[in-house]
């Protein structure tokens, strides 16, 4: 049962991620692939400021969460 729930959650997250613009998908995928990365390293990788990294990450996580919550109610 838990495996089915995990698969459903992953499917919903993948759907929500696909709804983001491509550059934001890449940004979030980087965080998923490198969860322990420091903001400074991410900023360098994407050539943006550290503050922009935190702002972008926070906003995108909120978007993903909103999408996930909406889709999980259906």
Image: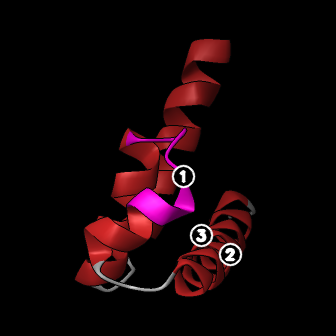
Give the residue displayed 31% in from the left and 86% down from the top.
21
Give the residue displayed 49% in from the left and 40% down from the top.
10
Q: Which residues are magenta?
A: 34-41
Dot 1, crowdedness within 10 Å: few (<14), some or many (≥20)?
Answer: few
- Measure the C-alpha gap from mark 3 to mark 2: 10 Å
Q: Which residue does the numbered mark 2 point to in the structure image?
A: 58
Q: Is residue 36 above or below residue 18?
A: above
* Numbered badge on residue 38: 1
Q: Which residue does the numbered mark 3 point to in the structure image?
A: 64
Picture quadrant of residue 29:
bottom left
Q: Nearer the viewer, residue 54 or 61?
A: 54
Q: Earlier in the sequence, mark 3 or mark 1?
A: 1
In screen coordinates, is 17 left or right of 57?
left
Name the mark nearer the viewer: 3 or 2. 2
Identify the secondary structure beneath mark 1. Answer: loop
Q: Nearer the viewer, residue 17 or 74?
A: 17
* Numbered badge on residue 7: none
Could you tell me if residue 14 is visible in this image?
Answer: no
Evaluate if marks 1 and 2 touch, with contact meaning CB atoms under 8 Å apart: no
Q: Earlier in the sequence, mark 1 or mark 2?
A: 1
The quadrant of the image that shows the C terminus is: bottom right
């Amino acid at each position: 049962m838990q495996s089915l729930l995990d698969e459903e959650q992953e499917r919903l997250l993948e759907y929500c991620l696909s709804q983001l613009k491509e550059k934001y998908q890449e940004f979030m995928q980087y965080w998923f692939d490198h969860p322990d990365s420091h903001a400074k390293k991410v900023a360098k990788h994407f050539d943006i400021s550290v503050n922009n990294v935190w702002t972008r990450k926070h906003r995108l996580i909120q978007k993903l969460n909103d999408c996930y919550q909406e889709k999980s109610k259906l």
